[in-house]
Image (cartoon, helix red, strand yellow):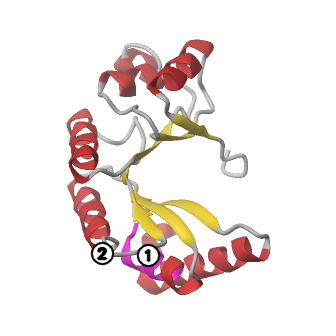
Amino acid sequence: IEDHMGPGDYYAGAVSMCRQMLAEGITRAYNFSLVSRPVLDAYRTAGMRARLAIAVKDERTFKENVLLSRLARKEELIKVDFGIANERETPPELIQRVVSESFRRGVGVQVHVAEAPPGRYKKKFEGSSVEYLDRLSVFSEGTIAAHCIYVHDYDILLLARKKAVAVACPIAN
């Protein structure tokens, strides 16, 4: 469905989501998206505090995250992190660029991790998804590790040692 959505659709969806959150008493949100400007504008319109990031999985989405970072530079309520779509789709070289750019700009990293069963990826990653991303230096204090569905005790300890924040998304999974 996202393949057929335009900027206006993303804006309308994000405004609707902001209204729903405000009605429930939620005044701050994290948003991990495929587009930048419409989502930024929706949070600005709603007057909500937000941390935004683009799901980087290729060069186009990396540039989109850089643009979002520039657009939000002077925002008081909205901060921009750098995002990694997930450990399966984002090439390791690009993951390292995302981490490097986030450190250079002094912003956080958001990553979808261990959202799918390890299956065929365990051999590719030479261990768990968390171990793989840790070898790429993704995790540090404040890194948002979304989902973390398929993790083991060792993964949880590793995230805790790095002071990363595991965020459950029960409706998504």
User: Does residue 133 appear to the left or right of 165 in the view shown?
Assistant: left
Residue 159, placed above or below residue 34: above
Q: Amino acid at mark 1?
A: Leu
Residue that label 2 marks: 71
| Residue 17 in which image quadrant | bottom right
Q: Amino acid at mark 2?
A: Leu
Residue 112, placed above or below residue 132: below
Sort mark 1 into few (<14), some (14-19) or many (20+) by Cα contacts within 10 Å. Answer: many
Q: Disc 1, disc 2: CB below 8 Å? A: yes
The residue located at (40%, 15%) in the rendering is 123
The residue located at (24%, 37%) in the rendering is 96
Give me the disc on residue 40: 1
Residue 138 in magenta stretch: no
- Depth order, front residue of 47/66: 47
Q: CA distance from mark 1 to mark 2?
A: 8 Å
The residue located at (55%, 13%) in the rendering is 154
Residue 23 coordinates in the image, percent (x, y): 77, 77
Q: Which residues are magenta?
A: 35-42
Query: Can residue 5 be seen in the rendering of this structure?
Result: no
The residue located at (43%, 73%) in the rendering is 76
| Residue 94 in which image quadrant | top left
Determine the residue located farthest toward the right in the rendered image: 24
Q: Earlier in the sequence, mark 1 or mark 2?
A: 1
- Depth order, front residue of 2/30: 30
Sort mark 2 into few (<14), some (14-19) or many (20+) by Cα contacts within 10 Å. Answer: some
Give me the disc on residue 113: none
Mark 2 element type = helix
Mark 1 element type = helix
Residue 135 coordinates in the image, percent (x, y): 32, 21
Residue 130 coordinates in the image, percent (x, y): 46, 25
- Depth order, front residue of 117/30: 30
User: Does residue 161 appear to the left or right of 25 in the view shown?
Assistant: left
